[in-house]
Image (cartoon, rainbow, N blue to C red):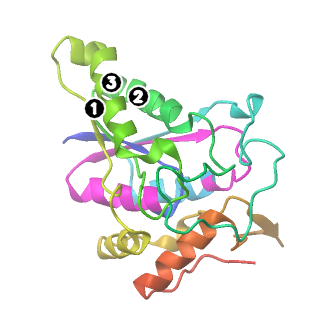
Amino acid sequence: MKKAIILLSGGLDSATTCAIAKSQGFELYGLSFFYGQRHQVELESAQKIVNFFQFKEYKIANIDLRIFGGSALTSDIEVPKNNIIENQNYNSPIPITYVPARNTIFLSYALAFAEVVQSFDIFIGVNAVDYSGYPDCRKEFIDAFQTLANLACASSSQNIGSFKIHTPLIALKKSEIIKKGVELGVDYSITHSCYDPQIIDGENYACGTCDSCLIRLDGFKKAGLNDKVKYI
C-alpha cells in the first residue's frame, strides 16, 4: 500500500485532507507539531482524527516558535476578532496570525519523515480561496517546495522516487471542503479551528470571532450544514 505523510493540525481542512488521502488508497502517517501555539487544544483534535482514520503511525514534533514570536499565535499579541478580510488576494495585508515560515518548517519535517518511512507523497491541507491570506498557502510556494524536496533528498537524488506535495483543497471554497468531507464521512465535531479557544467547566469552546472561526462558520452556513463544535 502507498504511504502518505499527512500534516495534521486538528482542523477541518486537515481532517478533510486525511479523508481524501485515505479514499485514494494511501496508508496514513500523521505528523503534528507542538510549536508553542496559543491554540494547543488542536493537538487533542489531531489525536481524535488519527483514531478516527486509523493512522498507521502518528508523531508529534516538539519545536519552539515562541522564541521568535512575530505572530498572535506564538506570542502575547492579541488575536484579532471580527476582523475577517473579504476577497483576500495575494496583495492583501498579511494578518498578525501568520506564523513566520511555519509551513516551510512543517513541510521540511514531513519530508524527513517521508524519507524514513519511504513515502513519496506528502499531503497538506492548505487553501488559497477562503483563507486568511498566508503566503505559505499558495500554489507557487507549494510548487517551489516540491522542487526543493526533489533536489534536497537522498531518495530523489538516487532516483529511488520523486516527492509530490498534494494539496487537494487549495482551490476549493470552505463550503466545498466541508461538503467533500461530509461525502467522505468526516466527523467535523472532532475538529478544532479556533485561534483563541477558551476552557469553560473543563470543556473547550471556540471563540466564534477570530478569522479562523468566522471562515469556518461561513463555510458551514454556505454548505447548508450546522457546525457541531461548541462556541462561546
Q: Which image quadrant is residue 145 in?
A: top left
Give the crowd class for mark 2: few <14, some 14-19, many >=20 residues within 10 Å.
some
Sequence-wise first label, 2 or 1:
2
Which residue is tagged 2?
113
- At mark 3, the secondary structure is helix
Q: Secondary structure at mark 2?
A: helix
First to last magenta residue range: 13-42
Front residue of 169 and 187: 169
Q: Position of residue 121 (x, y in %)?
A: 27, 37
Q: Which amino acid type is shown beneath numbered disc 3?
A: Ala
Q: Is residue 16 magenta?
A: yes
Q: Residue at the spot x=43%, y=69% of the render? A: 174
Is residue 32 depicted above or below 82 in this figure?
above
- Determine whether, in the image, residue 98 is placed left or right of residue 196: left
Residue 160 image-quadrant placement: top left
Name the amino acid type tagged 2. Answer: Phe
* Circles 2 and 3 in contact, beta carbons < 8 Å: no
Q: Are marks 2 and 1 in contact (CB under 8 Å)?
A: yes
Give the labeled residue for mark 1.
119
Q: Residue at x 41, y 61 (%)?
A: 129
Is residue 133 placed above or below 212 in the rendered structure? above
3D distance between C-alphas at marks 3 and 1 = 12 Å
Q: How far from the left and from the top, in percent, is residue 155?
A: 25, 17
Q: Earlier in the sequence, mark 2 or mark 3?
A: 2
Estimate the x, y position of residue 101 in percent, counting from the top left: 56, 33
| First of labels 3, 1 by sequence position | 1
Residue drawn at x 56%, y 80% is 228
Which residue carries the number 3 mark? 149
